[in-house]
Image (cartoon, helix red, strand yellow):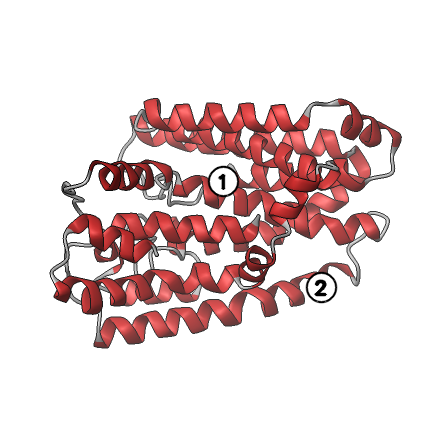
Amino acid sequence: LRGLAAVYVLLHHSSLQIASYGESPNIFVTALVYAIMNGVKYGHYAVVLFIVLSGFCLMLPVIRNNGEIKGGAINFFKKRVRRILPPYYLAMGLSLLLISTLIGSSTGTHWDVSIPVTTKDIITHLLLVQDVFADTALKINHTFWSISVEWRIYFLFPILILLWKRFGALTVTLSALVLSFTVYFALYTYFRFFPPSPINLNPYGICPHYVGLFTLGMLSAEISFSKQSNFVLLRQKLPWRILALSAIAIALVIYDKLINSGSVWVIADLIAGIGASCLLVFASSTRNRLFNDALAWKPLVFIGGFAYSLYLIHAPLLQIISQYLLTPLGLAPWIELLVLCF
C-alpha cells in the first residue's frame, strides 16, 4: 500500500507538470490521456493514506509488546530521528543544489511553486515548520510540507499510547478525531472573520486534523491484530471491504463536486481516512488470495521499501526530465504527459 501511494503521488505530480494537454489525433489516445488526468488528480488523498498507514505501522510493535512502546519513548524518538531526518536533509540539500544549478528558473511547470528560495524558506525547512506559513510550505521541494506535519505527530505518539492504555482505543480515537477537527475548524472560522490568517490552513498547511487520521490508523491496527474479544468481534463481524469502498467513493465524489467549497476538503479527508482505515483492516484480515497476492506483488513491495525516499526526491527529478529531456524534443503535450508518467 505504501508503494502504491508513492507511485500515485509520482503520477499525480507528473500530470501537474504539463500545463495543457492539447488534443491527440487518435480518439483512443485522447481517452487514455483523459483517464490519466482524471485518475491521478486525487494526490492529496495519497498523503491521507500515508498518515493513516503511519499510525497503523507504528502501532503494530506496540500491540506485539502488550501495549508498550518497546524501549520507551526516548528509544522511539531516536528511531524516528534516524528514519526521517537524514533522508529529509539529504533531499533538501540536493533540491537546493539543483535549484542553484539546473532548475532555479521559472518554466511554467508545477515546479515553479518551489522557487525562488529565500532565507526564510531554508530556516523553516531546517526547523521542520515550513507548513506553518503559506509562503514557505511549498518552497525548495513542494512535497516537503507533509513531512513537517507528520514529524509533529510523532511527538504525540507516546502520549496517545499512555491515553490508549488508560481510557481505551475507541475513546482515544474518537476524542482525537473530535479535538483535532475542532482545532482546524476553530482556526478556520476565526481567521475567516478576522483575516488575514498568519497560519497556513490550506490543504498543504498544518492540517491539525491529521492527528485524528493518524489515530484512526492506530485503531485499525488494534482491530486487525488485537486479541481482545471486542476487537476480534469487530474484525470478524463488520463488512470492512464494503465500508472501505463506500467511504473512498464518497470522498472521491466530494472531491469532484465540492472540493473548492471552503473547508469541505477537511471533511473529505476524514471520509478518505475512514476508508483507508477500513481498507487496512480488510487487507489485514481477508483470506482473499487474489487481493493478498496483488498487494504482496514483489515490485510494489520493493517500491514500498524506499517509498519515503521516492516521495522526497521525485519532484526535482521530474522537473529535470521535463525541462532538459522532454521539452527540447518539442513533443505534443499529450505525448510529453505519457512519457513523463512512464
Viewer-closest of 88 and 240: 240
Viewer-closest of 263 and 195: 263
For residue 322, above or below residue 212: below
Tell me the quarter of the image containing the C terminus: bottom left
What whole-number distance in Å separates the C-alpha atoms at marks 2 and 1?
24 Å
- The amino acid beneath tag 1 is Pro
Q: Please tell me which residue is depicted at 72% across the width and 48% down the height of the picture.
A: 59
Q: Residue 25's x, y, as percent?
A: 14, 42
SS at badge 1: loop
Viewer-closest of 259 and 252: 252
Q: Residue 149's x, y, as percent?
A: 48, 50
- The amino acid beneath tag 2 is Ile
Q: Which residue is identified by label 1?
A: 208
| Badge 1 density bin: few <14, some 14–19, many ≥20, Cα 10 Å | many
Q: Which residue is identified by label 2?
A: 74
Q: Please tell me which residue is depicted at 31% across the width and 65% down the height of the picture.
A: 316
Q: Please tell me which residue is depicted at 78% across the width and 26% down the height of the picture.
A: 234
In-image side of 274 versus 97 (left or right): right
Rendering quarter of residue 218: top right
Q: Residue 257's x, y, as percent?
A: 33, 22
